[in-house]
Image (spheres, rainbow, N blue to C red):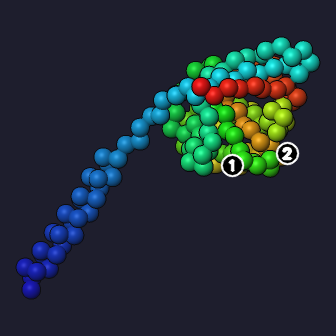
Amino acid sequence: MRFLATYCVLCFLLTISCKEERKQEIKTETISFTKEGELSIFKSTTDSIIANFDIEIAETEYETQTGLMYRESMEENQGMLFVFDDVARHSFYMKNTQIPLDIIYLDENRKIASFQKNTKPFDETGLPSQVPIKYVLEINGGLSDKLGMQIGDSIAYIKK
């Protein structure tokens, strides 16, 4: 009986040890940027180009949920455009997002409707659009102010 009890304890300890080793082996891979299109931002008052970006386009549910998570950095001329099927209020959060972002909410006419600027990495607080929108552009935090972007400015993009 004593042998059986010792054997059970050893099997239990080995099982726990194996589980611990497997947990340590799991690593998250960094996701690299994949250019899927080009986007330009236009000043509403002059219709002149404020900036040009290479973009990734999030169209599927998985791409929309993942967004820019697990990215260590992003070039200043890069961003991600989210395209929704509907025009509605949408909210984002920074779960598993390592870099501060400017989240730019755009209406169905591709005009800037609202901003969430310099978002805090890893923060799971909701960042709502405040108004119904169809598109969202995410760029590096602070860049929208640096470029002088304002509500009413617009975008145009093409898929590659």
Numbered badge on residue 125:
1
Compared with 10, 45 (above or below) is: above
Measured in 3D between alpha carbons, the distance from the residue under mark 1 to the one under mark 2, in whole angstroms, is 18 Å
Question: Secondary structure under badge 2?
Answer: loop
- The residue at which mark 2 appears reads as 131
Q: Position of residue 80 (x, y in %)?
A: 63, 32
Residue at image coords 66%, 45%: 93
Neighbours of disc 1 within 10 Å: few (<14), some (14-19), many (20+): few
Residue at the far right in the pictured view = 45
Q: Give residue 112's position: percent from left, percent from top.
A: 82, 32
Q: Quadrant of the N terminus?
A: bottom left
Q: Secondary structure at mark 1?
A: loop
Give the residue drawn at x 68%, y 26%: 158
Q: Which mark is residue 108?
A: none
Q: x and y percent of residue 102 in the render?
A: 71, 31
Classify residue 148 as left or right of residue 99: right
Task: Please give left or right for residue 121 compared with residue 91 in the image.
Answer: left
For residue 37, say whether it is visible. Answer: yes
Q: Residues within 10 Å of mark 2 (few under 14, many from 20)?
A: some
Q: Nearer the observer, disc 1 or disc 2?
A: 2
- 47 or 6: nearer the eye? 47
The type of residue carrying mark 2 is: Val
Amino acid under label 1?
Thr
